[in-house]
């Protein structure tokens, strides 16, 4: 009798569980996923708050009232950039470049208005900090939007979209979070490997500002004339290396070779600081600067060589690590060997150190 009762109880529990899952399974799944997303949302909120506070602390060094700074940063965090229409691709590079330049100038003007006593280098570094704060705030608002939408409607589709994108968003947010202290302390970051490599080749020479925020150095290397291009430091700056290369090709030709040095994202399993060589222009970003290099090089039939130092996205925008620093030293030798093997004495060469020059004088 006891066995029969136990069997009936087990069957009852089994069928009750089956009907529970059948009728409420999706709702339970949504609730479980919402808890997971809410945990990630909390991490994003803490990161954006930390970035905002670090910017406020940094700019307050210039004797600004914290209340005024906080009001303005809240307004800037809600700012946005509209990309140009791409229905007609003709001229899209010029339009995109104009929008990006306007955005960059706008941020620097806002920082200068908040801290009028800041130097040009300080303004560049503070602008980078402000971009980190704006970026983290944007990620937080995006995730919060889909979280609240899924919670409000109980829609599994909105939640599924968020869960597919969430790992990449959180990885990018972690990278931004790691960059907060590096930019606040004006320390060289992983993305600065290009300027760090070429600064060893310029060996303390004085350069000229060829185009806005972009320096060029005239260096003799084993009988070859090397035009070294990099952004102006030591503030956080990427300059306009593509425009500088285009101008050098037009005004200082003939050029026999263009070599670009930049950071590159590694694949999982690859060691940080590994150096690789390739063909083409190694320059990230929206593509406007790379367009200038590729267009001018192809027009004049100039070979394009690239040397990259591999790292993770977190290492790229945080303080430079010992492994990446080792890669910088190895890249210097690799660049010199490439110049020796791919050119001859008497040639004119352009060497471009691509990347952010924060902490790189």
Image (tube, rainbow, N blue to C red):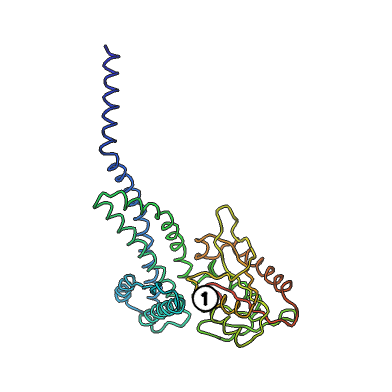
Q: Residue furthest top?
A: 1
Count of numbered marks: 1
Which quarter of the image is occupied by the C terminus?
bottom right
Element type where label 1 sits in the image: helix
The structure residue drawn at horizontal position 42% and vertical position 82%, both measured from the top left corner, is: 118
| Above or below, comparing residue 266 to residue 280 in the picture | above
| Above or below, comparing residue 10 to residue 294 in the picture | above
Please identify the quarter of the rendering in which residue 241 is found: bottom right
Instruction: From the top left corner, tell me how far across and down residue 276 is, in percent.
Output: 64, 63
Instruction: From the top left corner, tell me how far across and down residue 153 is, in percent.
Output: 24, 51
Q: Residue furthest left?
A: 152
The structure residue drawn at horizontal position 58% and vertical position 62%, both measured from the top left corner, is: 310
| Above or below, comparing residue 47 to residue 83 in the picture | above
Q: Is residue 361 visible?
A: no
Question: Which residue is at the front of the view, 45 or 33?
Answer: 33
Which quarter of the image is occupied by the N terminus?
top left
Instruction: From the top left corner, tell me how far across and down residue 127 is, in percent.
Output: 42, 75
The structure residue drawn at horizontal position 42% and vertical position 57%, both measured from the top left corner, is: 170
Q: Taking 49 as reference, is 358 left or right? A: right
Instruction: From the top left corner, tell me how far across and down residue 273 is, in percent.
Output: 61, 61
The structure residue drawn at horizontal position 64% and vertical position 78%, both measured from the top left corner, is: 301
Q: Quick one: label 1, few (<14), some, or many (20+) residues within 10 Å?
A: many
Question: Which residue is at the front of the view, 38 or 186?
Answer: 38
Q: Is residue 79 visible?
A: yes
Residue identified by numbered label 1: 289
């Amino acid at each position: 009798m006891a066995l029969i009762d136990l069997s009936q109880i087990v069957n009852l529990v089994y069928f009750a569980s089956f009907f529970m899952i059948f009728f409420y399974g999706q709702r339970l799944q949504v609730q479980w996923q919402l808890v997971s997303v809410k945990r990630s949302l909390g991490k994003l909120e803490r990161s954006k708050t930390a970035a905002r506070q670090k910017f406020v602390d940094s700019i307050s060094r210039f004797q600004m009232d914290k209340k005024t700074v906080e009001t303005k940063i809240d307004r800037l965090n809600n700012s946005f950039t509209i990309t140009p229409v791409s229905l007609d691709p003709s001229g899209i590079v010029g339009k995109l470049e104009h929008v990006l330049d306007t955005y960059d100038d706008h941020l620097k003007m806002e920082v200068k208005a908040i801290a009028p006593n800041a130097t040009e280098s300080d303004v560049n570094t503070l602008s980078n900090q402000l971009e980190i704060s704006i970026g983290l705030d944007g990620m937080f608002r995006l995730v919060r939007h889909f979280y609240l939408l899924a919670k409000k409607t109980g829609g599994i589709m909105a939640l599924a979209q968020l869960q597919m994108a969430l790992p990449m968003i959180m990885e990018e947010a972690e990278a931004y979070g790691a960059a907060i202290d590096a930019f606040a302390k004006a320390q060289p970051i992983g993305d600065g490997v290009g300027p760090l490599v070429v600064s060893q080749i310029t060996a303390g020479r004085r350069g000229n500002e060829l185009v806005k925020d972009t320096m060029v150095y005239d260096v003799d290397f084993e009988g070859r004339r090397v035009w070294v291009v990099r952004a102006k430091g030591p503030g956080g700056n990427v300059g306009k290396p593509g425009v500088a290369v285009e101008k050098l090709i037009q005004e200082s030709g003939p050029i026999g070779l263009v070599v670009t040095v930049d950071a590159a994202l590694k694949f999982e399993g690859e060691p940080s600081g590994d150096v690789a060589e390739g063909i083409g222009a190694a320059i990230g970003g929206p593509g406007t600067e790379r367009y200038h290099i590729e267009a001018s090089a192809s027009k004049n039939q100039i070979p394009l060589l690239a040397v990259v130092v591999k790292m993770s996205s977190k290492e790229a925008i945080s303080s430079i690590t010992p492994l990446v620093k080792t890669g910088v030293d190895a890249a210097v030798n690799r660049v010199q060997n490439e110049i020796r093997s791919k050119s001859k004495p008497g040639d004119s060469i352009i060497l471009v150190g691509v990347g952010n020059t924060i902490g790189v004088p």
